Image: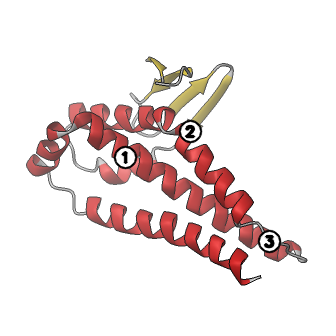
Amino acid sequence: MKVRSWYGLTGEIEVENELWHLVKIGDVALHHPPLVNLILRRRLPREDRLRLSYLHEFGHFQTLPIALMHALFILCAGRRRQRSIIGRLKWLTVLAVAHEAVWELASEAYVIARDGAAYRETYRRTPNPLVTPFWVITSSLGIGLSWRLLQRRNER
């Protein structure tokens, strides 16, 4: 499906395959396993699973500016001088995990904002015990690790 974000970015999203999703912007195609969708859409009827998965992927398009601002903020504000390659790799790993968690949270928040009552009704009909842990763990990783990166900067 061809999509256009609120800020003008155009691309394509394909969620028909349950094992791989495609997000394409221009000539850049990102085939990826839908890990968050597999967790959150577990046991949902096919129609609901596809609707919410599509909205989640479109949420990544819509929240890209937030994700980029977060990445730049923690990259600039949390940067510290590491002397060892191991130290640099640890820092980059923490930064990547924090960034991914924040972007997944933003994308799923977009789904809730866009789907509203239908989102709640879908999970009321087909409860998924992994939804609450997703929000708790992902929030902890995104906010907690971002905060830690910033605190390390202030400690120096």
Question: Looking at the image, which residue sits at the far right?
Answer: 83
- In the rendered image of this protein, does residue 101 appear above or below residue 146? above
Q: Nearer the viewer, residue 34 or 150?
A: 150
Residue 67 percent across, percent down from the top left: 56, 46
Left/right placement of residue 35 relative to residue 118 reads right
Quadrant position of residue 90? bottom right
In this picture, is 145 found above or below 32?
below
Identify the mark nearer the N-term, 1 or 2.
2
Q: What kind of residue is marked 2?
A: Pro
Q: Are marks 3 and 1 in contact (CB under 8 Å)?
A: no
Dot 3 corresponds to which residue?
A: 80
Disc 2, SS: helix
Give the quarter of the image for residue 87.
bottom right
Give 129 or 152, whichever is nearer the viewer: 152
The residue most toward the front is 154
Instruction: Tell me if mark 1 has few (under 14), some (14-19) or many (20+) residues whose alpha carbon lies within 10 angstroms of its own.
Output: many
Mark 1 to mark 2 CA distance (whole Å) = 15 Å
Q: Which mark is residue 108?
A: 1
Q: Amino acid at mark 3?
A: Arg
Residue at 22% in and 63% down: 129
Residue 125, percent across and down? 9, 47
Apparent side of residue 72 relative to residue 110 in the rendered image (left or right): right
154 to 135, vertically: above or below = below
Give coordinates of residue 76: x percent, y percent. 74, 58
Rounded to the nearest whole Å, what is the CA distance between mark 3 and mark 1? 31 Å
Residue 65 is marked as 2
> Relative to residue 20, is residue 156 drawn left or right?
right
Give the quadrant of the C terminus: bottom right
Question: Which type of secondary structure does the marked residue at label 3 adopt?
Answer: loop
Colour setup of the view: secondary structure
